[in-house]
Structure formats: C-alpha cells, structure tokens
Image (cartoon, rainbow, N blue to C red):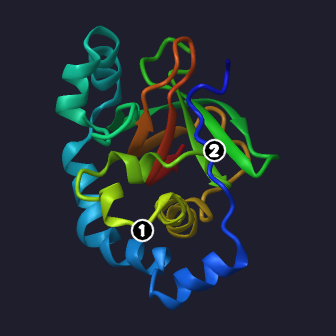
Amino acid sequence: MALAGCKIIKTPTAEETAQSAVGGFDPDRMVGEIWDSKVVPYLDRKAGPFSEVAALAASNLEAAGAKYGHKEKQGNAPWTFAARLSGTIVKAETKSRSAYVEVDADGDGKADARVQIGPAIRGTAIRDSLDFVNFNEFKNQIEWAQYGKAFNTLVNGLVLEKLPRDQLVGKKLDAVGAYPAPAKGQLPLFVPVQLTVAG
C-alpha cells in the first residue's frame, strides 16, 4: 500500500477543540515561545551540509540519524534530518497552495531536494527533527498533530510569505531546515526554517 507511512488522525470535535482551548493548550503560542531561542539555533547547530547528510543516510541510515537526525523512540517513526541546503532552483511549482521548488545541490542539473514554500506545508518535519519536544508531554494525538502544524504555520508567516514567486528557476537558494528520510526514489521533502533566494 502506498499509504503505509501515513497516520490517520481524527479531526477533533468542536467539544475537544473547546476543551483544549479551556485547558490552556495553545500550540501557536508554545511554538512562538521557543522558535528564536531554541528551534532555529538547534537546527542551525545540528544541520549538516545536505549532500553529506543524504550520502550518509543512503549508506548508513542509523549513523546519519545519530549525527544529523532525530526520531521518536516509540513506534516506527522515520528519521528526520537537519540539513543545510544550497543550490540552484531547477523547477518551481508556485500555482498550488502546496508550492515548492526543486533544488540542484551538486551542480549536475538534476533536482536533489524539493523545498516546500507554502502556504500549505505537508508533514511535520520541523517538529519531528527536534530532540527537546516529546509526544509524551501532550495529552493526545490530536494535540501532538496541532503542535506539529503550528511549526508550519509559524514558518510560513515568518519566512515563506515574503518569498518572491516569479522567475525562481535559475536562482540560488540557501536554506536551513529539516526533512524526513524519503521513500526510495523520492526527492527529500525539505521544510526550511531559514531561507534566502538570490540571483
């Protein structure tokens, strides 16, 4: 099945959402409070050059995970890697809400990674790359999912909304961010926490 890596997360009822609000659970505020002091410095420190991270992950996934990655100890979560990506944009899809650019990091003219530029960001790579956040600190799967989404919302507002959307192909991209170990033959799906496009 193609959906083997997906988790079904039920949509919270209005009552559950209200209970979360009453209980003081505010994922956007929680993420905002740690973003500049913990999240960005942690990823900046942990990130290896993308080509090194990808090469090590291809030859020894556990070693790459120990050096550049993180995964929840429970269950069968994939490794999520912190990386520093630099390269040339070779493709841009900016019409959909899940916009992205594909980046050639090694100069061969072919895409090595797909960088999500929002506003809709798939997955929870930022949350999953952090070793100081933990599923067990949350009441349930719904709160954990909302927390993961709050990282995407914040990065979109702080970093991605300001990005130009026109004539991106051929420009140079520099980013620090995270991506889950991709399925065989798939491009890594990179979520940036810092991103510049120039040229």
Left of 188 or right of it: where is 51? left
Give the mark nearer the N terminus: 2 vs 1. 2
198 vs 77: above or below? below
Q: What mark, if any, has residue 55 been given in the picture?
A: none
Q: Please name the residue that numbered disc 1 is placed on.
A: 139
| Position in image of residue 34 (x %, y %) | 31, 72
Q: Secondary structure at mark 1?
A: loop
| Position in image of residue 14 (x %, y %) | 71, 78
Viewport quadrant of the N terminus: top right
| Circle 1 residues within 10 Å: few <14, some 14–19, many ≥20 | few
75 vs 90: above or below? below
Residue drawn at x 57%, y 69% is: 157
| Position in image of residue 150 (x %, y %) | 51, 66
Residue drawn at x 47%, y 74% is: 27
50 vs 135: above or below? above
Q: Amino acid at mark 2?
A: Ile
Depth check: give the residue in front, 85 or 177.
177
Left of 45 or right of it: where is 133? right
The extreme right residue here reads 95
Residue drawn at x 67%, y 21% is: 2
| Circle 2 residues within 10 Å: few <14, some 14–19, many ≥20 | few
| Position in image of residue 73 (x %, y %) | 27, 40
The extreme bottom residue here reads 22
Depth check: give the residue in front, 94 or 138.
138
Q: Please name the residue that numbered disc 2 is placed on.
A: 8
Viewport quadrant of the C terminus: top right
Quadrant location of residue 103? top right
Q: Amino acid at mark 1?
A: Lys
**Alpha carbons under labels 2 and 1: distance apart:** 17 Å
Residue drawn at x 44%, y 34% is: 180
Depth check: give the residue in front, 189 or 28.
28
